[in-house]
Image (spheres, rainbow, N blue to C red):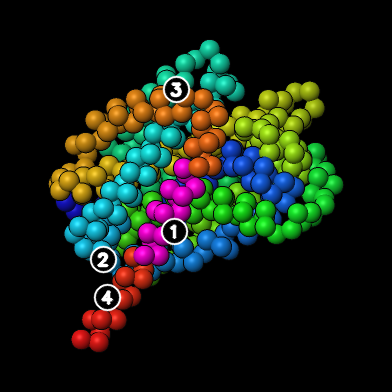
């Protein structure tokens, strides 16, 4: 099957949407719980620490043009070991695919529509995701071009409107507990904004025409997402304070509730809600696309669209039962997600990079 092609600007928008799609409204709480008022420093360091991983992903793609990440894994590691590694990669894509609807359903049901069952919201979300994947990566990429502009405008608008409530004393004392909590916070944040970039390896380099320009698009998209995440966490700490940010489930949403334009324009927190739901949709679509495409390639299917609807039904069912309660969800993130994301988002690309260099060195020597 001929692979569809996307432009490098579309690659930029996909990278940006994927990197901060799952973290815009919730991640500030986790980082503030670790680094307290220094959470903004963690957010500032994370893009710097993530650059080597992004470079490795770009390098692997540049060495294997026309291949998806699953195909690259099997090409480098061989049939058997490569299959095991590919299964691990696909499993985390599937895991994220049914986590994203749960977050959307939980947020909408608790914050906006408490009388609506979360399962109904999950159903509507998954219908949109399935339709998007059936239309193909070109349609997803074109939608991403529009969404990134929408997200940028709403993010700037939110920062401008909430800025009168800033209290710089909320940042003090700086580095009260040293750098250890700051680096730990950066590691946690990395698991949320760096690993999704690895998901794009199912699109890059297979769907890219101009690989020489793709490097700029990936790095720009990642840095753009890192900047938006940094601003989000910084404003949360400046307005709400480190302690309040740490105990809230959706701190960025509460942050937007501080916006008041006289007595006429209130309830503008849905600007943030709309931004987050859009980025969650892009994130959900990308992980579902990566999971379905990777699974079809692993099974040797010629057309991944044949399993989109059945997999969508499975994801819908799993989104309802994945987290019994909030405590279970928090424990899962702390105890399972961190090593899971580290293995597939850091160790796997590094392993592929090392094995590729070894095989290349052996080939030259022979």
Residue that carries the numbered disc 3 in the rendered image: 121
Tell me how far mark 3 sits from mark 4, CA to CA: 49 Å
Q: Residue at x 73, y 35 (%)?
A: 244
Q: Residue at x 80, y 27 (%)?
A: 262
Majority secondary structure in the magenta region:
helix
Look at the picture and state if 220 lies above or below 109: below
Say which of marks 3 and 4 sits in front.
Answer: 4
Residue reaching furthest to the bottom = 365
Look at the picture and state if 260 lies above or below 30: above
**Mark 1 or mark 3, which is nearer the start of the sequence?**
3
**Mark 2 or mark 3, which is nearer the start of the sequence?**
2
**Mark 4 or mark 2, which is nearer the start of the sequence?**
2
Horizontal and vertical percent position of residue 146:
47, 44
Residue that carries the numbered disc 2 in the rendered image: 76
SS state under label 4? helix
Mark 2 residue crowding within 10 angstroms, few (<14) / some (14–19) / many (20+): some
Tell me how far mark 1 sits from mark 4, CA to CA: 20 Å
SS state under label 1? helix
Residue that carries the numbered disc 4 in the rendered image: 359
């Amino acid at each position: 099957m001929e692979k569809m092609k996307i432009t490098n600007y579309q690659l930029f928008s996909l990278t940006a949407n994927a990197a901060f799609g799952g973290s815009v409204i919730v991640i500030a709480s986790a980082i503030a719980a670790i680094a307290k008022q220094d959470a903004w420093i963690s957010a500032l360091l994370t893009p710097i620490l993530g650059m080597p991983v992004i470079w490795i992903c770009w390098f692997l793609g540049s060495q294997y043009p026309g291949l998806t990440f699953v195909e690259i894994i099997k090409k480098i590691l061989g049939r058997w070991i490569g299959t095991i590694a590919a299964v691990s990669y696909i499993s985390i894509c599937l895991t994220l695919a049914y986590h994203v609807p749960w977050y959307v359903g939980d947020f909408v049901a608790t914050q906006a529509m408490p009388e609506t069952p979360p399962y109904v919201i999950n159903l509507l979300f998954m219908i949109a995701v399935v339709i998007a994947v059936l239309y193909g990566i070109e349609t997803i990429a074109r939608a991403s071009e529009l969404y990134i502009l929408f997200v940028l405008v709403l993010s700037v608008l939110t920062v401008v409107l909430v800025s009168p409530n800033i209290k710089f004393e909320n940042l003090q004392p700086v580095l009260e507990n040293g750098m250890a909590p700051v680096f730990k916070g950066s590691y946690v944040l990395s698991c949320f904004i760096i690993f999704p970039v690895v998901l794009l390896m199912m699109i890059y380099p297979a769907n890219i025409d101009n690989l020489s320009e793709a490097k700029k698009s990936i790095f720009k998209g990642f840095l753009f997402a890192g900047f938006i995440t940094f601003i989000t966490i910084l404003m949360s700490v400046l307005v709400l304070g480190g302690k309040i940010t740490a105990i809230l489930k959706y701190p960025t949403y509460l942050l937007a509730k501080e916006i008041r334009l006289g007595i006429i324009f209130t309830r503008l927190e849905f600007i943030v809600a709309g931004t987050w739901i859009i980025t969650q949709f892009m994130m959900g679509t990308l992980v579902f696309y990566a999971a379905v495409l990777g699974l079809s390639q692993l099974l040797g299917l010629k057309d991944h669209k044949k399993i989109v609807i059945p997999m969508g039904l499975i994801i819908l069912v799993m989104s309802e039962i994945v987290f019994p309660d909030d405590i279970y969800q928090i424990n899962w993130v702390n105890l399972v997600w961190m090593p899971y994301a580290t293995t597939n988002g850091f160790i796997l690309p590094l392993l592929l990079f090392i094995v590729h260099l070894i095989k290349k060195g052996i080939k030259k020597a022979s």
